Image (spheres, coloured by chain):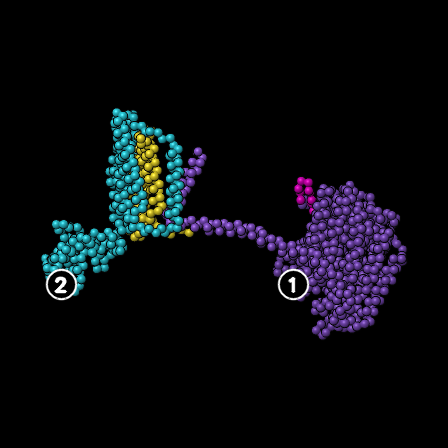
Chain colours: A purple, B cyan, C yellow
Amino acid sequence: MTGSLAGALTPSATVVTSLPAAGVQRAAWLVLAFPVAGALILLLGGKRTNSWGHLVGVAMPLAAFGYGVIAFVAMLGYPATQRSRDLTLFNWIPVAHFQVSIGLQLDQLSICFVLLITGVGSLIHIFAVGYMAQDAERRRFFGYMNLFLAAMLLLVLADNYLGLYAGWEGVGLASYLLIGFWQFRPAAAVAAKKAFIANRVGDAGLSLAIMLMFATFGSVNFAGVFGAAPSASTGVVTAIGLLLLLGACGKSAQLPLQSWLLDAMEGPTPVSALIHAATMVTAGVYLIVRSSPLFGLSPDARLAVAIVGAATLLFGAIIGCAKDDIKKALAGSTMSQIGYMMLAAGLGPAGYVFAIAHLLVHGFFKAGLFLGAGSVKHEMNDEVDMRRFGGLGRIMPFTFVTFLFGYLAIIGIPPFSGFFTKDGIIEVAFDKGGTSGAILGSATVLGAAITAFYMTRVMFMTFLGERRWDDKAHPHEAPPVMTVPMILLAVGSAAAGAFLVLGSRLGDFLAPVRGIGSAPAAHGWFTKPGTAALVLVVAGVLIAWAMYGRREVPVVAPAGNFATVAARKDLYGDVINESVLMRPGQWLTRLSVYFDNRGVDGLVNTLAATMGGTSGRVRRLQTGFVRSYALSMFVGAVLLLGALLLVRL
Amino acid sequence: MVLAASAADTTRSITFWLLAIISVAAGLGMVLARRAVHCAVLLAVVMLSLAVLYAMLGAPFLAFVQVIVYTGAVLMLFLFVMMIVGISSADSIIETIRGQRMAAALAGIGLLVLLTFIVGHAAIGPGTRTGAAYGSSNINGLATLIFTRYVFPFEITSALLITAALGAMVLAHAERTSAKPTQRRLSRQRVASGRPAPLPGPGTYARHNAVDMPALLPDGSVSRLSVSPVITGLARGAGPGPAVRTEALRAADTASAGTASAGINGTGGGSHDSGPAGADSGDAGSGDADSTPKEAR
Amino acid sequence: MISPGHYVALSVILFVIGGVGVLVRRNAIVVFMCVELMLNAVNLAFVAFARLHGTLDGQVIAFFVMVVAAAEVVVGLAILTAIFRTRRSASVDDPNLLKY
């Protein structure tokens, strides 16, 4: 069904009721149970499970994926308006006015995420079996990965904000554990801490939003909040929306909480692929889309989301241009692509669908790109500096081809997946109209051009050109356990976009979801913005070819102009954080310590010293001489008599 | 009658004022005297004057008890202990605790002022004789009171006295560190010492017969053995004791240092003359027996 | 006319003298004797007050004071001899180890 343009932009007025789960979907808790069991077995089992731990670690996501497929098929069996199903597991907080239960809501949006998380997650787990084969702690790794999966699934399946928050925190924890997996490396430990702290700032926003929701609506269930939302004042809804945006920024590494994502590349590559590309960083987008009834009531919050998305997409793209570390370049790319998703999510119902579509295909191609980078790194003795790669395409054909598919998808070349979704986002941005629409649309087009540039740069520096590595490295193709997942992901990179967008398949599927309303309008093939974007993409590719394909790539990074230097420094993101937050924080700490030492301790110590000093003086009364004691008795008696006299007279 | 009354009054007044001055003077003297024996004697003076005052206040029984028990028994107990402890332990004038004297003086003056104030403020009228309600005489009255109203304190004080006596016995008891020497051992010792016979007693003369008078040997020389070495302080390896500078003994000692058997055959006439003369000077010497102990100690 | 007030005044003076004596003298026996002086002064006051009221209770109390004073002197002097035997000193200032 194609809605009108106006219909595409106004929030839906239909009330979606959620029915209780029936049939196969009653066992939806299995989706959570499998990874939880895996995590428990592996983490509590300890070294005993070392030999077969990775098999359990892979089997659990596969089992969860299997169930996800079954639940999906069952869902397709229902009519479109009856696909949202609730399953209450248990009553978590039974306090008088604050009743919260852990329940799962299986609707179209969450099933998309479940399939993405478990599907791509399983492939990455299989890849990790090969990637982490030499690591003695592989079992623990899989334990943490399963823990992550469990938390992420809880996040997307929860039917209330508190359950979502529990999953939110769980993925934050898993991210910390996995980034700092090689905790003996100081850089990794610091990066893990940085990620966790930046996430915490976002979490504060999310928790404040939940508190505000409870205070305003008296409930934290999706049904309760969305049902009562129209009756609240716009100011409150805007506040909630902005706080949710803050939470999303923390988790999805958007401005201003973006500094942790590039450092998070210290973790093993499967972690970067799963958490920091496909799933965790998309949790912010999920939050925004899920809260669409709230955002629908507050145009200001929506605009804020769109602006944050636009700014971040350019920010990430610029950073990606100057990074020589292949993983960091891809991380910048992730930041940028999620900026696209945020931008789309801020544009209303039409944008939601494209945001989710882009999210799903991004999961495929970004995971594929990261796995390719991991494969290269694995073969090059953990070298990640692209200036030391070069010419690997001939030696690692599978990796090269799968990477190529992901590359074409990300820069948006038809018919690969990225084209459809990105084009959709560009169209929706320009459809917004007015100055904001024009600015946002231009940002998306420019972003596409820059994306093309830096991804081509990565391709040329890594796989094409002359070899720049010395004889210490002996690269050859990765083992099948690593290449097969990459191939499967490449298939997704190639086909998923067309599958989802053409014929408005995803749009129609998601339309009944509360807050989304209707499927976005279909545009023609070659609209003005779309064509302009394609032209600029090609231009970007050509420029990158000119700089890196035709000329020789220097092994030592050249000094670069001020823009390059700025981009190398993450556009001064860390510097700003330090000067605005860290240093004042340190001064505050030092001030507090000083005050505590001098003031509080001084007070206490002075009291103690006074007591000590006084007693030191007073004890000199104990001279040991009987006569002085007799004197004091005598004087005491005299004083007593005097006092009695005073009283009686 | 008025004359008689006024005469009695005058006697009373004179007695009171006299005794008051004497007792205050004696009290001050007691506090200020350097030697303990002087303090004891002055305290006796105070007590006796107080006895007379009791009599004047119509408490004859108490007056006698004061003399007999207090002065006679308690004060004598003091003197006995002084004998044991040593009458030579005199205080030095220097005060060792800083500010003690000043503080004591101030406290004393303060107390005096306070008490005078209190007493002066109290309405103390003339005294009245005790009525006949308590019996014909003072003793009867006291007895009635003690054995009726104050019988319980009386019993308690009796218990106190018993306890005190027992306590004193326990405290003053000196344990033997070695076994008591038996008669057999003592006689063995005496025989083994080379002098089985008892020591000669001190000299007894017409004018001097104190314990520190030495006896004369047949040849007129002074017998050193007749005076206890504790008194002379001249015993070999002698401990503390008042050194009585008996000239004759000194002379005998130095002479005997030269000749081995001077004690018996001795100097004869010369020493015979010097005997009584020595005894005189010895007497003079014993006069300052009190002053010399200071040096000995 | 000598009223009991005079006797009480005398008693006060003797008491103060005795009190100061306790503080100033170092010989233990002399201290004891000063205490005796204080007790005697008190006795005098009691007897004077008995005279004032015309009763004999004051005298009985003075009597008991005398008894108690005697007991106290006995025990005190026994303690003194016991101490003297070991420490060879009758000064009140010598046992001064219980100090700061």
Q: Is residue A495 magenta?
A: no
Of A296 and A424, the residue lying toward us:
A296
Which contiguous range is marked in magenta? A93-104
Label 1: element kind: helix
- A128 relative to B108, above or below: below
The total number of labels drawn is: 2
Query: Which residue: 74% across, 43% down?
Result: A224
Q: CA distance from mark 2 to mark 1?
A: 109 Å
- Percent across and percent down for residue A198 are 70, 56
Which secondary structure type mostly characterizes the magenta part of the structure?
Answer: strand
Question: Mark 2 highlights which residue?
Answer: B261
Residue lying furthest bottom in this view?
Answer: A471
- Percent across and percent down for residue A34 are 69, 54
Question: Mark 1 highlights which residue?
Answer: A186
Of A392 and A544, the residue lying toward us:
A544
- Percent across and percent down for residue B119 are 37, 34
Q: Quadrant of residue A250?
A: bottom right
From where the camera sits, is residue A542 visible? yes
Mark 1 belongs to chain? A
Closer to the camera: disc 2 or disc 1?
Answer: 2
Which amino acid type is marked by label 2? Ser
Q: Badge 2: few (under 14), some or many (20 or more) residues near its Cα, within 10 Å? A: few
From where the camera sits, is residue B155 visible? no
